[in-house]
Image (cartoon, rainbow, N blue to C red):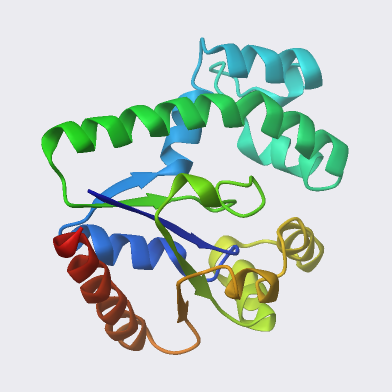
Amino acid sequence: MLVIGLTGNIAAGKSAVARHFAAWGATLIDADLLARDAVAPGTPALRAIAERWGAGVLAPDGSLDRAALRRIVFADPAARADLDAMVHPEVARLRDAAVAAAAARGDPLVICDIPLLFEAGLEHTVAGIVLVDAPRATRHARLLRDRGLDAATADAMIDAQWPSESKRDRAGWVIVNDGSPEELEVKSRAVFDALSALAASA
């Protein structure tokens, strides 16, 4: 089994690449979905978050108010580090369990979609890394257009991650998403075929 990390800075198009890889037959383990499970109502992580920041980060139904928490942590690096310490260990546990299940099934190619792969120091957990990248101005415009963010919030979210330039040399494959969705699909397919060939020879 070949386990590959898929990463990319916010609004680069990583999720679109992940959907392509999954549609073409890869087993996809999505860190964002695992993070949602890690802070579901009743979990230790959600209790820790509520104790740290108060009821203002909870929705009326007791679930996490992600927008409220995002406003706090993206304005305060120390708060973001506290949040990571609460959530990341549980996400790692859930990811390890999903990888083990894929291995038990005999899945040939597993894609771990991890937005903060480099920031969290997870390079050693995968056999190779695919980076999806796009120019900063393009990503900023996408955040305003697609997520309805204001410019200051978009800048804060971009600045919370390592610059993509520092990630390129650490990645085995780089997909530059600066064109049309059709162009992204073609680039993604080329990388997927290379990964499939590696998995077949592993």
Residue at figure coordinates x 60%, y 64% from the top left: 9
Does residue 26 appear anywhere in the picture?
A: yes
Q: Reply above or below: 165 against 85.
A: below
| Quadrant where the image shows the C terminus | bottom left
Q: Residue at x 82, y 34 (%)?
A: 79
Q: Position of residue 171 (x, y in %)?
A: 52, 69
**Left or right: 86 as drawn, with respect to 17:** right
In this orientation, which residue lies closer to the viewer: 129 or 81? 129
Number of numbered discs overlaid on the protein picture: 0
Residue 22 appears left or right of 47: left
Q: From the viewer's perspective, is 86 left or right of 103?
A: right
Residue sitting at 70 percent across and 26 percent down?
A: 57
Q: x%, y% of residue 190?
A: 27, 81
- Image location of residue 130, percent across then percent down: 44, 67
Q: Is residue 64 visible to us here?
A: no
Above or below, 58 relative to 80: above
In this view, the residue farthest toward the front is 202
Q: Is residue 91 above or below residue 132?
A: above
Residue 54, given in percent of the width and then of the height, sits at 78, 17
Q: Quadrant of residue 64?
A: top right
**Which residue is found at the position 57% from the left and 61% from the top?**
147
Residue 170 sits in quarter: bottom right
Q: Is 173 rendered above or below residue 109?
A: below
